Amino acid sequence: MNKKYLEKKYLQEIEFLNDGIKNSKNPYHFFTLSTNSNNNPESRTVVLRGFELNPFTIYFNTDLRSNKIVEINENPIVSILFYDNLRKTQLRLKANAIVHSKNEIARLKWENTALQSRKCYMAPFKPSSKLEKWHPNIPLEFLDKDPDKESSESGYDNFCVIELVCQNLEILELHHSGHIRFRKNFNTGKSYFIAT
């Protein structure tokens, strides 16, 4: 095991991340985002919507009214977790989160958001709000159909893009003969093995 292996494995995971943007069967299409809420961890699953290598940046979309936005605004340092059960590979990242709402980045992502996804942002209730009785939290007239583009524009006010600028990455490969774990620091560019 040497530094060449680290680079090869790193590049392999980059390929999986790029594929995970569009391929819903790729386990990296979904990831866990953890934030801090009054010194309590909060985790949820989100959908990978974009990835850039330099700097190492991950994107996802969410409702501007959600609790995670409040948490990010209070403390933008977040933790990210990907896991591929078939390959027994885990990616763990620390990142600085940036909220994009009603700007060029948000508008570009919104224009490329499918109508069936747009209707989620037309929700009458703020995410995590208490309901007196169950409600699908999408406009009732669009329960069984997608909105037209003009109607869907009302969701843009609630739409935002989260940009996650990563500081470091840990890759863990599980093996019966001994796990392999290493860290890549994006600030220094250095990679090194770490104990499991």
Image (cartoon, helix red, strand yellow):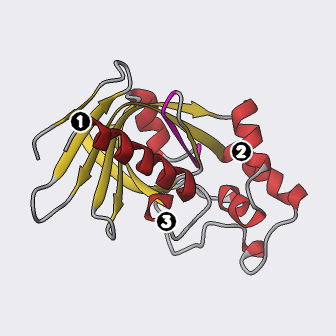
In this rendering, does residue 128 appear at all?
no
Label 1 sits on a secondary structure element that is loop
Disc 2 residue type (three-letter) = Lys
Query: Which residue, given by chain and number where applicable, does mark 1 sit on?
Result: 39
In this rendering, does residue 66 appear at all?
yes
Q: Earlier in the sequence, mark 2 or mark 1?
A: 1
Image quadrant where one finds the N terminus? top left
Q: Residues within 10 Å of mark 2 (few under 14, many from 20)?
A: some
Question: Across the whole image, how many numbered discs are drawn on residues?
Answer: 3
Quarter of image, res 79? top left
Disc 3 residue type (three-letter) = Asn
Q: Position of residue 44 (x, y in %)?
A: 39, 55
Q: Position of residue 170 (x, y in %)?
A: 28, 41
Query: Which residue, given by chain and number where applicable, does mark 3 sit on?
Result: 26
The foreground one among 7 and 143 is 7
Q: CA distance from mark 1 to mark 3?
A: 33 Å
Which region is colored magenta?
Answer: 55-64
Q: CA distance from mark 2 to mark 1?
A: 32 Å
Instruction: Identify the mark at residue 109; answer none if there is no mark.
Output: 2
Label 3 sits on a secondary structure element that is loop
Is residue 193 shown in magenta? Answer: no
